Amino acid sequence: MGNANIDPLLKEIAALFAEQGKEVYLVGGAVRDLFRGEKAQDWDLATNARPEEVIALFRSRRWRVIPTGIKHGTVTVHYKGRDLEVTTFRTESDYRDGRHPDTVAYAATIEEDLSRRDFTMNAIALRLPGGEPVDPFGGTADIRIQLIRCVGNPAERFTEDGLRPLRAVRFAAQLGFKVEKATLDAIPPALPVTAGVSPERVRDELDKIIQTPRPSAAFRLMEQTGLLRLILPELADCRGVDQKGYHQFDVLDHSLLACDYAGREAYPPEVGLAALFHDIGKPAVRKLNEAGIWTFHQHEGVSAKITRKILTRLRYSNAQIDAVCHLVAEHMFHYEEIWSDAAVRRFIIRAGEENLENLYRLRRADAYGMAGIEPAPDFLLPLVSRVDKALAGSRAFSLKDLAVSGKDLLAAGVRPGKEMGIILKELLETVVDDPDSNIREKLLEIAGNLNKRYESGILR
Ligand code: ATP
Ligand code: MG
């Protein structure tokens, strides 16, 4: 790596360390990306300076320093819009779940520090400021042949940290690299260790996988090694669930293709997850009809339920769970030209205006998954243009579009609570059917009538 490729800011930092007689190296993903000919995103630095010394060094120049992981020897430096992580050389991984050492064992040399890292491509350092490579495990050669290979003995590396198998398959999808045979073969025996990894760490890897250009590369390796059955058994159960008559693929292959489309198009993670799980209820609901064809009635509801179970288990946020499950539950819309304007408005209300774009994205991914063929750019256009027209017309899509509010109804004598809710919904129904009826007096009159019927006990 020539001097020319080292960012001036890194040289500036290196000078600070040199003044104190300390070494500093660029390490991790940034180095990997440089050797792949890509621009590095985040910078990870390794040094023989102790965390307190690192802090003092940057603070003396008034750079912002945050002791993010001081227990593990890591300090985050914020400078010129960049976050860089500076970690003191360490001897052993502290990634092991539940066994985080309270104090880290510092290493004396960069070579020792590199030896604790997961893959050869991640175990290269560039000495700063010059950029001379330190590559004791042949990482640059492996990058050249696009190979993911454990540093040292794969079985040992995976036993130290059960997340590493998942990182291997994630990198395979992210970089388009192959996993070396001995490394891949070491995954199945390490599954019990992976089973003990915290759900949050697994979630973070899953999130990264679905945002690669080809998530299926990771999921196929996961299937092959048993990781899929361990982490997403519900998805593994979709293998062999054929859907002849609808699709050429079984449910798993279809789901993976849909997920690939979402990844390749860089759709938001909610869409990627929805694409992966949208049909996951199919194995549970399938029935053979008289013609000997499998049917999957109401699978979307079951898919949403299973998706919720999975995402909860993996500690996704409630907001994310709700967003993904909503997309899954609503993915089966079938637009036809004969839809009335009211039907279009009802579709918008069901979907939620803010979710329309993601629902269209999911549909495109789903369509791609049918045959692995690019959907025509305008295949959703008939629906989208009807929806856009409806949205541009008089607004009647949510309670806040109504010409009356809950307060107005209170004033008109409607009791708060369940009845109020039902009456408001009824008013929205009325307005959705006929937007011209969204007039205060008219709605108050309808509400008054409904209220009377409640009070007299006709409705309850
Ligand atoms: P990316 O940031 O794209 O995920 P990265 O390689 O920078 O890729 P990080 O998680 O940021 O990954 O970790 C930085 C470096 O720390 C890695 O390149 C690797 O050397 C080391 N590392 C990270 N996680 C582990 C782990 N679980 N086991 C061993 N080494 C690890
Ligand atoms: Mg990184």
Image (spheres, grey):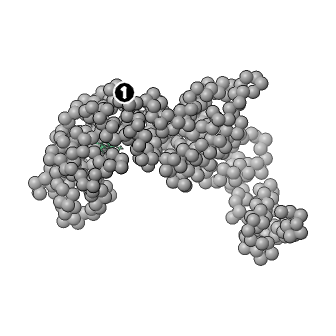
Q: In the rendered structure, which amino acid carries the disc numbered 1? A: Asp
Measured along the vertical axis of the image, is residue 83 above or below residue 309?
A: below
Residue drawn 73% across the image and 51% down it: 346
Measured along the vertical axis of the image, is residue 433 above or below residue 120?
A: below
> Which is nearer the eye, 121 or 184?
184
Residue drawn 48% across the image and 34% down it: 228
> Which is nearer the eye, 250 or 369?
250
x, y (%) of residue 203?
45, 46
> Which is nearer the eye, 414 or 241?
241
Q: Is residue 114 left or right of residue 363?
A: left
User: In the rendered image, is residue 261 in sight?
Assistant: no
Q: Give SS at disc 1.
A: helix
Which quadrant: the C terminus?
A: bottom right
Q: How crowded is mark 1: few (under 14 residues within 10 Å), some or many (20 or more)?
A: some
Q: Is residue 308 left or right of residue 52?
A: right
Residue drawn 20% across the image and 36% down it: 135
Rendering quarter of residue 237: top right
User: In the rendered image, is residue 207 in sight?
Assistant: yes
Which corner quadrant of the figure contains ligand 1? top left
Which quadrant: the N terminus?
A: top left
Q: Mark 1 points at which residue?
A: 185
